[in-house]
Image (cartoon, coloured by chain):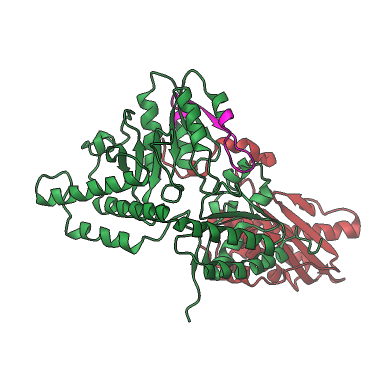
Chain colours: A green, B red
Amino acid sequence: MTPRKVYLDNSATTQVDKRVLEAMIPYFSEDYGNPNSLHAWGREARVGVDKARAQVADLIGAQPKDIIFTGGGSEADNLAIKGAVWALKDKGKHIITSSIEHHALLDTVKWLGKNGFDYTILPVDETGMVDPKELEAAIRPDTILASIMYANNEIGTIEPVAELGEVCRKHGVLFHTDGVQAAGHIKIDVKELPVDMMTMAAHKMYGPKGVGALYVKKGIKLIPVIHGGGQEFGVRSGTENTPGLIGFGMSAELAANRLASGEIDNEIRLRDKLIDGLMERIPEITLTGHRTKRLPYHVSICVKYVEGEGMLLLMDAAGIGVSSGSACTSGSLEPSYVLLSLGMDHPTAHGSVRMTLSKDTNDEDIDYVLEKFPPIVEKLRSLSPFYKKNQ
Amino acid sequence: MYSEKVVDYFMNPRNSGKMDDANAIGEVGNPKCGDVMKIYLKINDQEVIEDIKFETFGCAAAIATSSMITEMAKGKTITEALKINNKDVAEALGGLPPAKLHCSLLAQEGIEAAVADYFIRKTGKAPEGFKTPYSTCSACSGSCGGGAGHDHEEEEEIFVSEDHRAAE
């Protein structure tokens, strides 16, 4: 019997679904034409790209022409922020975001801060939630854009996006949300949601890496970040990554089916089984992020008295893939800024472990993790000068 | 990322745990930075380290360097043990990734701090130039970017990714 392997790092990336891969393959060496070419090869590819755009649009209730394909989530974030503020720079220079955004967002905003723009970074509460009232209070006459993520990658908290978007709409401020972790995992309908732009990434929903999209509501003007041949409605130049887009389209369609079928409920059940199981078996651990307003696949905890990297490596040796926001895993000596934003102290934040489930995770996988993880914590705690057993 | 030896010494730590009859204890590091190493020594009348134990809060490299230095120091006189430097520890482990070299320094300072404690208990003071038995955050030598005083709170503006980024 081969030893069990349990991949619980689906917030980092997911396994490409076989149906996605099968859909992509013909576009590498059969339908390989440039979608911008007029001949049969090009037309074949164009049909595929158009279909993919419609599939991605359907996932979030958008129109195909509102979908701009990019080379991934980070690029879509950059396009949304830089593209929007550049288009609005005569109207104002103030941007609002939150302290727990992905670096693709935060670093972009901070770079703009060094280049003529001004920004406010909103704090979050101990569950990682942004308060719509604080957003409203931060809005100034020259505020042009606010960007608050749909759900956080490290702690799984789902932000009150509808309320935040409502505040922005009331004040005539453009609202972007980074939906990389949420799209395909939570029902999102932009027809009902007051969101002007939303970032998505294929590889977080069983699609290929290096493919993303920015939903842009009709009528919003963006200045391109990548100039060139005028592809993607002139907003994002570059020959389309046809196989990648086809894969994204298929992964979006499969995600929409999962959301409609209620398959996500089983993921939530397994998530809660893991959370409750860890809490029962291991003393002095904390769930980070919101207990219920969290991504269906997301479990994140902090284990007191031990450091995350050791847990990650011992779990890896047991065939379980997890991640950590500890300093040692990030290459700096600072633990995750997201965990510190929750008001967590440094030593506790160093003990962070994230386990993110996939659509294929099953009960046996969770049982296996619940069997393997507690002794690993116990082993590392026995080495820790801070851990006093039975105290 | 880690050598086989580092993995081995992390997975199967040598000389780990508390020591009830230690006559010297040193603790170095800072929980804020994510590394704290506690070294227990039993030193006999000939000033030979008869027994040695460690407890470490930290990453795999911190545990492996603690583990390795305890093995290297065991059975040596304190004078010999103090000559083990961080490079010896890193070499004995088959090398460390650059970001983890401070862990080997922490190990070296852990021994020094414990020996200082031995002299304090014996003579009332540590020999000149020694680490104090409970020194904080000296071992990372500013590699955590905190600078003097290690005021991490002020670093909010600096992101790790900037270190790797080309000129803007």
| Viewer can see residue B116 | yes
Q: Tally the marks.
A: 0
Please identify the quarter of the rendering in which residue A310 is found: bottom right
Residue A240 vs residue B164, the one in the foreground: A240
Is A13 placed left or right of B106 in the picture? left
| Viewer can see residue A114 | no
The question of residue A114 being in magenta is answered with yes
Is A3 placed left or right of A40 in the picture? right
Q: What is the x, y in percent for residue B122?
A: 90, 60
Residue A204 vs residue A186, the one in the foreground: A186
Residue A1 vs residue A223, the one in the foreground: A1
Please identify the quarter of the rendering in which residue A75 is found: top left
Q: What is the x, y in percent for residue B84?
A: 68, 64
Q: Quadrant of the C terminus of chain A?
A: bottom right
Q: Residue at x 64, y 57 (%)?
A: A307
**Residue that extends furthest to the left in the rendered view of this protein:** A39
Q: What is the x, y in percent for residue A299?
A: 57, 55
Q: Residue at x 60, y 70 (%)?
A: A372
Q: Residue at x 70, y 51 (%)?
A: B31
The question of residue A23 being in magenta is answered with no
Is B10 placed left or right of B75 in the picture? left
Q: Is residue B30 above or below residue A367?
A: above
Is A45 placed left or right of A298 in the picture? left
Range of magenta residues = A112-133
Q: Residue at x 28, y 41 (%)?
A: A64
**Residue that extends furthest to the front in the rendered view of this protein:** A261
Q: Is residue A164 above or below residue A61?
A: above
Q: What is the x, y in percent for residue A29?
A: 18, 60
